[in-house]
Image (cartoon, rainbow, N blue to C red):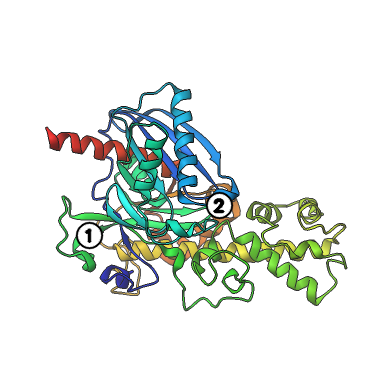
């Protein structure tokens, strides 16, 4: 993290500056919209705000993205998104004139202003190569104009920043946010004087939100196994996003499938009809979670998933137990790595009892201070065993006394709602400055 703050390209952890130097404080009012794009579906939102950190009304619509648009052209993708927003606004009977629009774009972006940024590269399922290097907010603005919508992006953020904004809106002790869903990433509030690569940058605040981009971290202490997906050249982002591939929802089920495939190659525990194990990504992480959470005596759900998804009928109980054990190991490793990464951020900003890492002894010093980490993502929210392992690891690393001061607070629809809040906040600030 220090290396990433010192220079661009200085670290696998990119530490991208977001241009967000003010977070919602509860004074925002009115209606704003948001688009939240980060995976194979996106969300459009309408958020009505009242005084005193009150969300009066929130409407959310989910829209799947056809697979051909994730590998087509940028015009086709952004036209599809703009059209969905237009239809949503028309159904809601809303006006667009003067409405703020937040755009959550959860891919690595080099931010050039609060409302613009160029795409560094795609992650997850997307591979629209001609979009790399383009200003994604401008791409959306042009698509909005083509669809007859008189509105522009006020704020461009990623999902971590949106989640942090919503967390801070409700609780100003929120210092960081973490996404653990289809992908994983984090952001936090950093002192400007600690950001060496941007010293001298003009800002209205003493702090800036930093997008960690921890998915590309390759921890030297963690030995990759032959089953970790960065060894498999049939998958997306070959030799990339190594940390994300050990933690996030797109990949955990695939790691398990690769282990099961190797077991089938070296033994007959699955029988002889094992062709179903050769299909990449046929086992989803929700399947993995259901396998791990099956507590029936005969592991009936495990057998059902193996038959339905991997075409492995009549798997004996002994093998089902092995399958559940593998699923547990993959889950536990992912959760503990996520916990360690959260503690790294707390250590960087002095909230873990080590005086920003200057001592290896974690102990409570001075006034007991509360620290809130906003968190969003289907893997964390929907997989109870993953949450338990993560919380267990936080206590193990921090110690019970300091862990008791750290609160992980789930933010439902945080990334999109937070973008709408930030759009309202920055739109209001611009209006005040122009008066």
Few, some or many residues within 10 Å of mark 2 (<14, 14–19, 20+): many
Residue 219: numbered disc:
none
Residue 37 locus on image (x, y percent): 46, 46
* Residue 313 visible in the snapshot: yes
Residue 357 locus on image (x, y percent): 31, 71
Circle 2: element type: helix
* Residue 412 visible in the snapshot: no
Give the alpha-carbon distance from disc 1 to disc 2, as whole Å. Answer: 31 Å
- State the residue in front, 241 or 190: 241
> What residue is shown at x 43% (from left), y 56% (from top)?
131
Residue assigned mark 1? 191
Residue 29 locus on image (x, y percent): 28, 29
Image side of residue 256 versus residue 434, left or right: right
Q: How many marks?
A: 2
Q: Is residue 41 above or below residue 344?
A: above
Q: Which image quarter holds the N terminus?
A: bottom left
Residue 379: numbered disc:
2
Q: Is residue 152 above or below residue 294?
A: above
Residue 55 locus on image (x, y percent): 37, 30
Q: Quadrant of residue 216?
A: bottom left
Disc nearer the start of the sequence (1/2): 1
Circle 1: element type: strand
Few, some or many residues within 10 Å of mark 1 (<14, 14–19, 20+): few
Badge 1 vs badge 2, beta-carbon distance below 8 Å? no
> What residue is shown at x 74% (from left), y 67% (from top)?
260
- State the residue in front, 168 or 209: 209
Image side of residue 208 versus residue 183, left or right: left
């Amino acid at each position: 993290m220090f290396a990433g703050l010192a220079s661009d390209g200085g670290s696998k952890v990119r530490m991208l500056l977001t241009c967000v130097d003010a977070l919602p404080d509860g004074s925002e009012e009115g209606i704003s919209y948001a688009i939240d794009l980060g995976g194979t579906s996106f969300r459009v939102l309408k958020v009505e705000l009242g005084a005193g950190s009150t969300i009066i009304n929130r409407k959310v619509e989910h829209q799947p993205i056809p697979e051909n648009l994730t590998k087509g052209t940028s015009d086709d993708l952004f036209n599809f998104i703009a059209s969905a927003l237009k239809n949503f606004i028309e159904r809601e009977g809303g006006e667009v004139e003067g409405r703020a629009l937040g755009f959550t774009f959860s891919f690595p972006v080099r931010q050039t202003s609060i409302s613009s940024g160029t795409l560094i590269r795609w992650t997850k399922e997307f591979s629209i190569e001609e979009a790399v290097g383009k200003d994604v907010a401008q791409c959306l603005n042009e698509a909005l104009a083509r669809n007859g919508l008189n509105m522009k992006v006020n704020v461009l953020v990623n999902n971590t920043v949106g989640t942090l904004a919503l967390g801070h809106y409700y609780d100003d002790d929120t210092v960081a946010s973490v996404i653990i869903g289809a992908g994983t990433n984090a952001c936090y509030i950093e002192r400007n004087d600690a950001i060496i690569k941007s010293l001298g940058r003009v800002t209205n605040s003493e702090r800036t939100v930093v997008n960690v981009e921890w998915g590309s971290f390759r921890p030297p202490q963690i030995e990759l196994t032959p089953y970790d997906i960065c060894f498999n050249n049939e998958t997306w982002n070959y030799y990339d996003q190594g940390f994300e591939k050990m933690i996030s929802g797109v990949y955990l089920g695939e790691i398990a499938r690769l282990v099961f495939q190797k077991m089938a190659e070296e033994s007959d525990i699955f029988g002889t009809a094992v062709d179903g194990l050769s299909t990449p990504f046929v086992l989803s992480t929700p399947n993995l979670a259901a396998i791990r959470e099956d507590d029936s005596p005969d592991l009936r759900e495990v057998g059902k998933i193996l038959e339905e998804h991997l075409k492995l009928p009549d798997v004996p109980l002994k093998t089902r137990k092995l399958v559940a054990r593998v699923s547990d190991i993959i889950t536990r490793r992912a959760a503990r790595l996520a916990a360690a990464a959260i503690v790294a951020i707390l250590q960087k900003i002095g909230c873990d009892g080590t005086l920003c890492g200057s001592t290896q002894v974690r102990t409570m010093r001075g006034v007991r201070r509360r620290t809130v980490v906003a968190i969003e993502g289907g893997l964390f929210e929907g997989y109870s065993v993953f949450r338990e392992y993560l919380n267990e690891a936080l206590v193990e690393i921090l110690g019970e006394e300091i862990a008791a001061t750290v609160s992980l607070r789930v933010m439902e629809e945080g990334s999109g709602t937070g973008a709408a809040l930030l759009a309202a906040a920055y739109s209001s600030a611009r209006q005040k400055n122009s008066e």
